[in-house]
Image: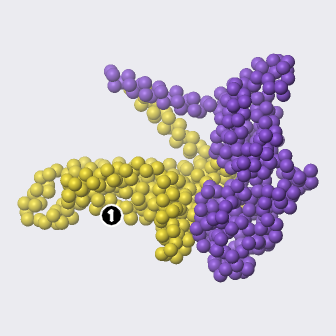
Chain colours: A yellow, B purple
Amino acid sequence: MSFCVLLLIVIIISMVYFVASKGVANFVNGEVKVSEFLFGTKWSPEADTPSYGAFPFISGSFLVTLLAALIASPLSICAALFMTEIVPGWGKKLLQPVIELLSGIPSVVYGFVGLSVIVPFLRDTLPGQGIGVAAGALVLSVMILPTITSVAADALASLPQNLKESSFALGATRWQTISRVILPTTFPAIMTGVVLGMARAFGEALAVQMVIGNAPFVPHSLFESASTLTSVITLGMGNTTMGSPQNNALWSMALVLMLMTFVFVLLVRMLERRNKI
Amino acid sequence: MQFKKSWIMALALTSVLALSACGNGNNGGNKAASNSGGNTPAATNTESSSGAKLSGSILASGSTALQPLVEQVAEKFMDANAGVDIQVQGGGSGTGLTQVSEKQVDIGNSDVFAEEKLKDAAKAAELVDHQVAVVAIAAVSNPKAGVDSLTKQQLVDIFTGKITNWKDVGGADQAIQIINRPASSGTRATFESFALGTKTEDLKGSIQEDSSGTVKKMIGETPGAIGYLALSYLDDSVKTLSYDGVEPSVDNVVAGKYPVWAYEHMYTNGEPNETVKAFLDYFLTDEVQTGDVVELGYIPASKMQVSRDVAGTVTPK
């Protein structure tokens, strides 16, 4: 058993080392400055004087992730409340399989549905060409819905029964009980679900890449073409040769993604600690 | 105890799988090399052209544009030579060139000359080029744009953002939406070098998609869209635009009249061994060139009446 754990630790450390060593290569050999990479807004790796500013992608990743969380969280929390508090019987029987089904759909299907349904809809109803940040955030919000819902539902279901009963005994209505007792007590656990959902949204590549447009600019509107870290990595990795500055810049973006994953894990840990009370 | 055992079994299984997947490239290469080495005396005795027994395995990786052709030809070649095992992987031209130059694969497929991608000129010089097919690329627009021919200058103005409405090039009053390929794409490099004659920067609001299928779908559906596709992808859902009045047809490409085309390369590291050479020679036979190559929408390299070098200079053959 201890051998397995040891092997796992070695594998994880070597993965982190691999991404980190390739990710810092450009900074170490002086090809790109860290500040230029993180805050530069001009990405033109194929130009005669190439520039490797990744800010448009970093901001794009954060933008779609936050938007997706904003859209998905209220829906997921409502669905979880519906399943556990309002109609625990048939509500749960109906919703649970639907939500589990959502999490099993491959992301290329989400991307294609986004391209065939959401993009034409946005193009016909709103300004722009349909492709852009809004389409990416909408597709992502559906993808992270199951994560947030199931974590929130688990948290609500594990709430001690006597807490609710005391609230009802004091004469509180169901709405008062939900808004004043249930939601505040389970808040850290629900937030764990939101953070896990955001972590998934931040790392999702294929579905977003298909609908976001991938222009390397900071978008000025939600209906404008933009890029995320993951979409730029998947578009560029196969077409660049290993060891070229452009390839190394893509690894630097992978490093940013990995560091963000650590941040999300840290957040979940902090929320868990608060949750123990 | 039972629990512990099953864990160790599972772990051992996964690590074996992982290791075999990693080592595949090297193993394949070594096996092919050693096998053909052992067979050389026999082969010289029986004369290889008369169907000497070939054996060994070949691993090819790289360009996704070339992948379907290599896969189909590999199937046929393996049917004819039972001792040969060929695996074809995608990954992109950059991956193919990197892997063949590091000897991880036997053949690296690429849409561009190795000299254009590999930053190390010495490494590029080690590679041997085998041009198996030609791909021509046409500018295409949404059918409602109302234009059927563009000049070089008009294309340059559109892709650099100087012209933003179709009415300025004689079409409908409709804003132009550029659907591009990623900056590192081989198709984009070909279109920029031979249709535009200049590199372009990504424009704000332009759309980039990686796969030709998605590009075609977007151009067909988006009002005012313009982009470019390989001839094999063209159909009625998009409008194919003539270039300086020349229609992008196979005949015009072969005759050297239509300039927007590029070779599909299969690179080997140094001269190929007997098995790999037989496979690459098979590509240039009439059976493949007028059969599979045409069938899959490429243009036979052997039919070209002009040739082009790495600097882009075109000479009649």
Image coords of residue B265 (percent x, y)? 77, 45
Q: Nearer the viewer, residue B208 or B102?
A: B208
The residue pinned by badge 1 equals A74
Callout 1 amino acid: Pro
Q: Residue at x 42, y 25 (%)?
A: B8
Residue A93 image point, x, y percent: 25, 51
Quarter-of-image position of residue A194:
bottom left
- Residue B172 image position (x, y, % from top left): 67, 80
Numbered circles on residues, count: 1
Against B31, is B191 above or below?
below
Picture layout, residue A186 above or below residue B154: above
Chain at numbered mark 1? A
Left or right of A154: which side holds A42? right
- Residue at point 72% right, 33% down? B77
- Picture quarter with the N terminus of chain A: top left
Q: In this view of the protein, can residue A172 be seen by the observer?
A: yes
Can the viewer see residue A42 in this picture?
no
- Percent coordinates x, y for residue B308 in the rendering: 86, 52
Which residue, as the protein is rendered here, is positioned at the far right? Answer: B316
Name the residue rendered at 41%, 59% in the picture.
A142
Residue sitting nearer the eye, A44 or B215: B215
Res B241 → quadrant: bottom right
| Callout 1: SS | helix
Judge from the rendering whether residue B296 lies leftward or rightward of residue A123; answer left or right: right
- What residue do we see at 27% from left, 57% from top? A80
Q: Residues within 10 Å of mark 1 (few under 14, many from 20)?
A: some
Q: Nearer the viewer, residue A203 or B279?
A: B279
